[in-house]
Image (cartoon, rainbow, N blue to C red):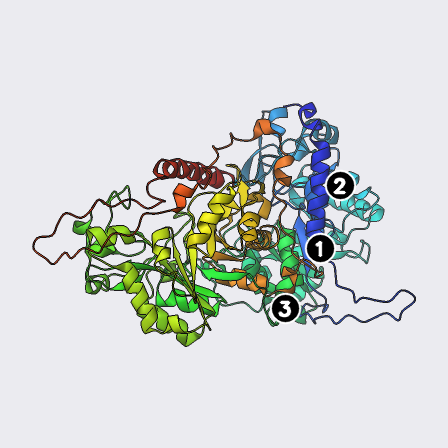
Amino acid sequence: MTMDFWDKHIMMRSLFLLSMLLHATMAQKRALPDKPIGPQVPTVIPAHKWSTLSGNEPLVIARGGFTGLFPEGSPDAIGLSKDISTFLCNLQLTKDTGAYCLTGTTLDNSTTIAMFDPKENTYNINGNDVKGHFSLDYTGAQIDQNVSVNQAIFSRPEFFDGVSPVLNVDALLEDKAPPKFWLNVQNEAFYTQHGIKVADIVLEILKVYQIDFVSSSEIGFLKSINGKSNKATKIIFQLLHATDVEPTTRQPYGDIVKDLLHIKSFASGIMVPKEYIWPVKPDRYLGLPTTLVADAHKFGLEVYASGFANDFFSSYNYSYDPTAEYLQFIDKEVSVDGLVTDFPATASNAIACFAHNNTLPQKGPTLIISNNGASGVYPGSTDLAYNQAIADGADIIDCSVQMTKDGIAFCSDSVNLIGSTTAMTKFMSRSSNVPELEAKSGIFSFDLTWSEIQTLKPQIVNTRGNDFPRNPADRNSGKFVTLPEFLELAKAKAVAGIMINISNAAYLASKKGLDIVGAVSTALSNASFDKQSTQQVLIQSEDSSVLSKFKDIPSYKRVLLVGEIISDAPRPTVDEIKKYADTVNLPKTSVITATTASLLSGVTNVVKELKDANLTVFVHTLRNEYTSLAFDYWSDPNIEIATYVQTGRVDGFVTDFPATASRYLRSPCSDPKHVPTILPAQPGELLSTIPAEILPPAGAPLPVLEVANVVDPPLPAVVNLTREATPAPAAVTPSSTASANASNFVLSLVAILVLAMLSSEHH
């Protein structure tokens, strides 16, 4: 692929970068009070006192720029991070002392060096034989003229590979407005062994340019420049993993860190893997914190924590929420002095928007609706999940009602108990095929009594597959909740509202003699929900005939659950919806569309059309796991939430993680007029920078919502299965989502599977 291929895209990529740069910098701008025109006495803006060594807010240090999205040291990576962070350059040197910024020992993975020179060499570095392409085997001219940078983390976007040259330190710092700069010297002993005088090169750089930080993991090097560098430059000792051996002293870093007084003799601070501060146990839960930060501060040493990335799993304690992890290091009694990250915008937002319990007196109007409670934390639809959702700030808690064989209504995500319970271990012999409900066999709630179900354990559902397990310590915690118990909890906790989801009503009535609609109506009435207006009651179903059963109770709102994308729906469809529902709950991709390559492609008119018809609009389902997020969201669930609130303009959203949503909506940064703020993604902008030739083929468009998809036949009568002889029940007419869209469902499922595979491939 030649550079000419990319030339036509330069203008679009530049415009995109300007937009993204604005997005990133908004979070760091400080709000100033409105002032009349004319000279004014400067106003002191109240500032939080930070528990850093200096008392100032922690620094954000961007490893190679915004490397969570772009290749390290590329212009886009630098530009997007420049105004919100200090640029960290991991130094590599060529045989003629050319200085470049690339993480690691070799040029492999992060560059196109193998295309220029297929031959590899092997060197012994710190006692280990390392094979690959090494910068010291090439001249600066060879690197400049023949080698480009790639995304080194294979799960990240590869669309920008081979576009930008390897970052030359001189070229960056000679710029009229260079970024704040941190020079991290890698493998000094290795270069010195091969005749490259690293200390002399670094001291020369310090004479010519303003360098804010110089760091190294080698004590000998730091001592060699100590006292010779500019006093404005801070010297930082980088500690590697505790068992790694420091080349000068031949001691493990885990032992060296115990002598902070000695470190103070040659450095003003330390940069440590974050596990030095919050250890992670073998089971991937956090251990007790160390006292390293407080101890270092007592000796006047700053502490910079490294290893942060939104798309690296760290600990189950964070529930796949990168902001929660950043806050763990800065929002405690003692704060680190800086965060080294591949995603500087998220770290910047954590500092500016979420630290110090920075919340609004009242959150915005967008509703937070739980998905089977806090199902990202505990098994869904259990007492633990519901209590957690309430504690985490959900406005609406939900119960998807299922029926047992003996007529007990209880909460469970699915009529098939295999995924969300341990039914497979006890009732495999009771599995059956019910093609009217599912294509695969299952163990269905209506084939078990309530007492039998109570012998099971709930089971957390890993929606992104077993590679992304949720809170395994509580995989089977909690107890099942009957519908009356759910309603009692909602009243006792005074939640703003409840959502009752009803499915499979026609099948249950005609084939199993179970009246799910009657069970819901009776439970709500017994709990007096039909006689009050303090708490919202939302009745949700895919079946319009179910919703019609509740039309005479004015205090109930009826929600049409849509399982497939609506695209530019015609006006008659909206009018038909209004006959049955007050609210529509849409899949999130029907509002903001995405390609099979996990790139946002645009915003539909669906929300506007529905709102113009005075319908309320929800979307489902928002999740924290980065594999559920388009690349445009920077692996940050806050950006996705901001996009659906500000761009999608939805009235509420369903989420597995109410805590993440609540924290955002209660932050002043959720207000787009507030400074600082968290801006939404711009659907289609990232996509516009990528040549169509390297994108995977677009998936087929999903079907438009038609009137026939909404209007369901009346519910059949509930059969009496106890009578010895009963007339054969009328054939069940499948609901809108089961008949008219059966073939479309298969196509949609295929599209979703393709998306999942591509998403996991790129993330």
Relative height, residue 687 to residue 357 (above, below): above
Q: Residue furthest bottom?
A: 492
The answer to which of 190 and 646 lies nearer the viewer is 646
* Alpha-carbon span between mark 1 and mark 3: 17 Å
Relative height, residue 31 to residue 640 (above, below): below
At 31% from the left and 64% from the top, the residue drawn is: 520
Residue 221 visible? The answer is no
Q: Is label 2 in contact with label 1 (beta carbons under 8 Å)?
A: no
* Alpha-carbon span between mark 3 and mark 2: 38 Å
Amino acid identity at mark 3: Asn
The answer to which of 598 and 513 lies nearer the viewer is 513
Residue 495 visible? The answer is yes
Q: Which residue is mark 1?
A: 26
Q: Residue furthest left?
A: 724
At 36% from the left and 70% from the top, the residue drawn is: 487
Amino acid identity at mark 1: Met
In the image, is 121 to the left or to the right of 531? Answer: right
Q: Which residue is mark 2?
A: 169
Q: Earlier in the sequence, mark 3 or mark 2?
A: 2
Q: Earlier in the sequence, mark 1 or mark 3?
A: 1
Secondary structure state at the residue bearing disc 2 = helix
In the image, is 180 to the left or to the right of 743? Answer: right
Picture coordinates of residue 424 (x, y %)? Answer: 23, 52
Amino acid identity at mark 2: Val
Q: Earlier in the sequence, mark 2 or mark 1?
A: 1
Q: Residue furthest right?
A: 39
Q: Is label 3 in contact with label 2 (beta carbons under 8 Å)?
A: no
* Alpha-carbon span between mark 2 and mark 1: 28 Å
Answer with the quarter of the image where residue 471 lies: bottom left
Camera-nearest label, 2 or 1:
1
The answer to which of 727 and 98 lies nearer the viewer is 727
Label disc, if present, on residue 358 of the rendered structure: 3
